[in-house]
Image (spheres, grey):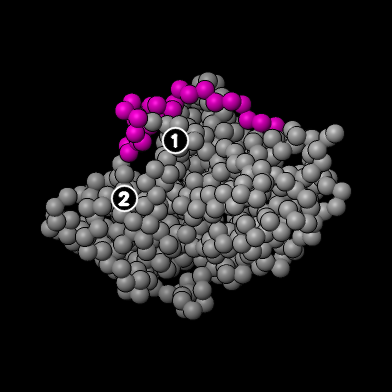
Amino acid sequence: MTDLRPIILWFRRDLRLGDHNALTAACATGRPVIPLFIDDEVASGQGAAARMRLGMSVRALADDLAALGSRLILRHGNALEVILNVISQTGADAVYWSRQYDVTAKARDTAVKSALKDDGIDAQSFAGHLLFEPWTVETKTGGFYKVFTPMWKTVRGRELAAPLPAPEQILGPNDWPASDNLDDWHMGAAMHRGGDIVAGHCTVGEAAARDRSDEFIAERVADYKAKRDIPGVQGTSGLSENLTYGEISPLVCWHAGWRALHDGKSDAEVFLKELVWREFAYHLSHHTPRIESENWKQDWDGFAWNTDETSPEVIAWKQGRTGIPFVDAAMREMYVTGTMHNRGRMIVASYLTKHLLCHWKIGLDWFADCLIDWDPASNAMGWQWSAGSGPDATPYFRVFNPVTQLDKFDKNRTYATRWIAEGEDDPSDTALSYFDAIPKAWGLSASDAYPEPVVPVDVGRKRALDAYQSRDF
């Protein structure tokens, strides 16, 4: 007889139907599938912008499932307790999910899988969030990679299977369990008035992610190497937002990049390297989980970082009022759009950790609260790379000059004027949007004078080098 006990498909950061290994496996059994999203301790612990954006993605997935005659069951609470409750209500005897690799998610998943198996439940985790499982990429001596370029050379030529198609139908149970109402979760509440501003810049859902990928490959990947560093033009893919929530798989992006490369668009290789840079972050998070919360290079533990988040320099940095246009423009872009150009991320991180000598954790936590494309592994590696305390990091003596960087990458000040209103006779709408997005308590106005630098670049550079050279690296 056909087994009609349902399989619970636990969605997390894999909010799509296409190229979804766990979903495909569940549907292939011919058994009913109950899609489930849990607002658990991991999901609810995210920063304001990420949590709001997650809610938008959950809604899009629910719509896509409904179009196939299925539905997304929503529950709030401890992950294991919710799953056991749904099992008791539905008679399900299997739970499938896509693996995650950050410290918090791994701890949750390990505990859930162990408890379910102890209860005789078939608990299976599947690949899909990464191109390569972290334990399958090794150096010639069998260790993990601590430098990016050798890892890239190792994985570049690997053959990867084609992406899986979305299921044409998803068999549902005869009786669906009750579901929470997504609106009752108020996932955007912590964004306050900035939520509406940021939401207008989001590209949400699987279909939109696929369209974004197709448009990038067709129109921009050929010039990616040069234009990706110019914040005033649309030169990047923008896919970090969608990869974060699994609205598109890295495998889809990988194959699209290779097709472009074979079609003669040589810059596509740089895009492929960026996908592997994301893999490198998770590779390190898996093998050295301390990277998410501690100095990866432990000889930095004694460095005298400023850890006072209430200091005037940190407040100016957070508000985008440092008096350094490249830094301020990038921070304001984040408040309006929820994202920040990659060149801007390097500049603001370098300025905070080197010119201001502030601990990278201050920036790590602030980005986690403000970015819609927040990713636990990439955020941690990016901040430690900039600070000099991470693997394959920028050398401690390399201090980005944000003034000359602006001259190099924003010669016409397109980016700066797009985001900075003070001192402009006719500020752009995007620059003015910053004042609608930020907390009223900041008391800032477009009519304010643009500030003098809180720390001039030459002073900050000298101070940083003096501090670094006073200790033994």
Image spot of residue 364 (x, y percent): 40, 59
Q: Which mark is residue 189?
A: none
Q: Amino acid at mark 1?
A: Trp
| 26 vs 348: above or below | above
User: Label 2, on which residue?
Assistant: 296
Report the residue marked by disc 1: 135
- Dot 1: what SS? helix
What percent of the width, then of the height, locates residue 421?
A: 46, 65
Residue 36 falls left or right of residue 380: right
Categorize mark 2 by other alpha carbons within 10 Å: few (<14), some (14-19), many (20+).
many
Q: Position of residue 226 (x, y in %)?
A: 42, 36
**Residue at (34%, 51%) from the top-left corner?**
384
Who is closer to the viewer here, 262 or 456?
Answer: 262
Three-letter amino acid code of the residue under disc 2:
Trp
Q: Secondary structure at mark 2?
A: loop
Position in image of residue 290 (x %, y %):
36, 52
Predominant secondary structure, magenta span: loop
